[in-house]
């Protein structure tokens, strides 16, 4: 059994962001087509860049497989990278949407 020292925080980051939105922020971002289109664009470029950085044939970034699931898709990208990326981008967008709503309602 591996240590999963990269997998556990990646999954936890996703759970925290989802709970933060659904229980506290309630921006409705997950119901927005613009959000999902944005995430598709982000994922496309993440695959290009991350695929180049992590390709096993000539890696620039190395991962200790003991600390991850070892699942890599596509082009040798550790699946945990997608989880962290999603959580980070979504958290920023949630704050952006929340701040925009606050500005529209006169809050500072």
Image: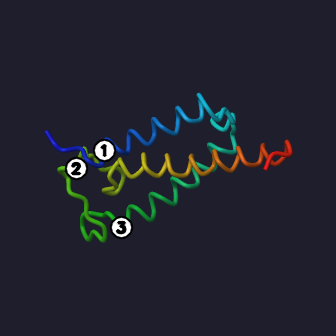
Q: Which residue is mark 3?
A: 53
- Relative placement, left or right, of 15 versus 68 is right
**Mark 2: few/some/many CA within 10 Å (<14, 14-19, 20+):** some
Q: Is 29 placed left or right of 54 in the picture? A: right
Circle nearer the N terminus (3, 2): 3
* Image quadrant assignment for residue 49: bottom left
Q: Which numbered disc flags the more N-terminal residue, 3 or 1?
A: 1
Q: Position of residue 58 (x, y in %)?
A: 26, 71
Which residue is at 63% across, 35% downward? 30
> In the rendered image of this protein, does residue 8 appear above or below residue 52?
above
How many angstroms separate mark 3 from mark 2 (CA)? Answer: 18 Å
The outermost residue toward the top is 23
**45 or 103: nearer the viewer:** 103
Q: Position of residue 27 (x, y in %)?
A: 69, 36
Which element carries disc 1, helix, strand or loop? helix
For the residue pair 106 and 7, the one nearer the viewer reads as: 106
SS state under label 3? helix
Residue in the foreground of this view, choosing between 17 and 49 = 17
Front-most of residues 73 and 98: 98
Residue denoted by label 2:
67
* Snapshot colouring: rainbow
Q: Earlier in the sequence, mark 1 or mark 2?
A: 1
Give the percent coordinates (x, y) of residue 56: 25, 63
* 104 horizontally vs 69: left or right: right
Q: Position of residue 15 (x, y in %)?
A: 45, 35
Residue bearing mark 1:
7
Q: CA distance from mark 3 to mark 1?
A: 19 Å
């Amino acid at each position: 059994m591996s240590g999963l020292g990269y997998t556990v925080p990646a999954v936890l980051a996703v759970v925290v962001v989802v709970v933060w939105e659904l229980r506290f922020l309630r921006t409705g971002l997950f119901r927005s087509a613009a959000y999902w289109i944005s995430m598709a664009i982000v994922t496309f470029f993440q695959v290009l860049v991350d695929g180049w950085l992590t390709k096993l044939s000539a890696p620039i970034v190395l991962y200790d497989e003991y600390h991850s699931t070892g699942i890599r898709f596509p082009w040798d990208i550790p699946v945990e990278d997608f989880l962290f990326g999603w959580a980070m981008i979504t958290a920023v967008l949630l704050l952006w949407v929340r701040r925009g709503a606050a500005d529209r309602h006169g809050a500072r």
